[in-house]
Amino acid sequence: MEANCPHLGADMSHADIEECDTGVIAVSFSDPPPAKVVSIIPEVAAPTIPREPEPVVPTANPPKTLMDWAVLILNTPDPILKVERTRHAVDLFFTGKLPSVGNKSSNAPKPPDVPLREESFAKNTVDPAKVKSRKNRAVMLHALANIEQWAIDLAWDIMARFGPRHPDIPRAFFSDFAKMALDEAKHFSLLTSRLKAISPSTPYGSMPVHASLWESATVTSDSFRSRLAIIHLVHEARGLDVNPATIERFKKAGDTDTVSVLEVIHADEVTHVTSGHRWFTWICAQEGRNPVTSFRDEVKRCWRGDVKGPFNEEARERAGLTQEYYTDLRGEMGLHDPSEGSKVEKVVCSNSKGLSEGLADLKIEYVP
């Protein structure tokens, strides 16, 4: 045996060779005789053993509180099961079959740093700059569905992460964000159904995606005020500005079914920004802060670059965001303290959320 690996030059003097007598002998010829192909046998992939589907309600240690459900859903990698569990948990909560929120318990479960994803999906996650431009409907629908999957997790994460830190927060907070999680699950299902209809060969999970939303969640994981400001009043509010153009693109393509889906999403998302604004002003009131000043401070600290327009001023105002919140606003994250910017590689404003006209005092109701 050679002392060094002929490919890498690594030391192999310590290695052992395992004998394996298969009865097959390899013979080499210095001048091989002519040969012909007798047959070509196609390679057969090893059969995959189908996984037993997980039940919506785990048989071992089923969730007993809303916090239990939140962490379970965050740790559910299968997006379809994530949607099913979201629907089930929210239904239990709103129908009184899950009376305990569980955020006041000293044993409240802790959410993961990053929600679980299926292995094939995780391998397809790339830097946002490497995601192809959204030139066709299938690519755009896939990108929108990816955003909605992260949005499901963000709704559960804000409850599980900050609920126990604020044990006196009103139950209405959990009602608002449980409804938000349910909406995002609906949006994900609608978008993946349209993706399947227009492009069966590219199901959800088959295209490159990015995790920009969760990068912002990581930056804001230590502050309830920061999380509400960046995720719900920057990322989601950006959808107020860009969604009409997205709908128009599908109209021009003659895709009326997708237009209908986007209009449903558009109508739901304004309530999400409204909820974000409601609880941002609540926490500011608890801490004796001015909400406009606090919002601008949070963006300066936890965002990089300009909060860009053009802005849908009418829709933003209906969600509670007057111009004083966002005019001439720029984030300076990482500009003064290099350690701030090292928390994540890049924070990119999502341009795929869509919000519609609505009233800031809109009553959010649950319909089972």
Image (tube, rainbow, N blue to C red):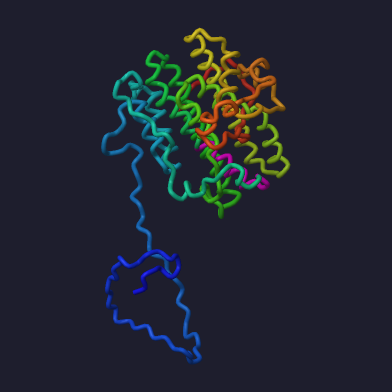
Q: Quadrant of residue 250?
A: top right
Which residue corresponds to the image point at 44% horizontal and 37% vertical from the top-left? 83
Residue at (38, 59) in percent of width and height? 48
Locate residue 303, reporting x and y percent.
Answer: 58, 27
As drawn, 118 above or below 272: below
Who's the residue at 30% across and 28% down the image?
64
147 falls in the magenta region: yes
Range of magenta residues: 134-149
Quarter containing the N terminus: bottom left
State which quarter of the image contains the C terminus.
top left
**Residue extending farthest top:** 288
The quarter holding residue 45 reads bottom left
Residue 254: within the magenta? Answer: no
Q: Is residue 357 left or right of residue 94?
A: right
Task: Describe residue 288's horizontal placement relative to residue 250 as left or right.
Answer: left
At x 68%, y 17%, the residue is 323
Of the pair 367 and 321, the residue shown nearer to us: 321
Point out residue 161 in the picture as x, y percentages from the top left corner. Answer: 41, 26
Q: Work out whether 24 lies above or below 10.
A: below
Locate residue 176, reporting x and y percent. Answer: 48, 21
Q: Position of residue 213 (x, y in %)?
A: 54, 34
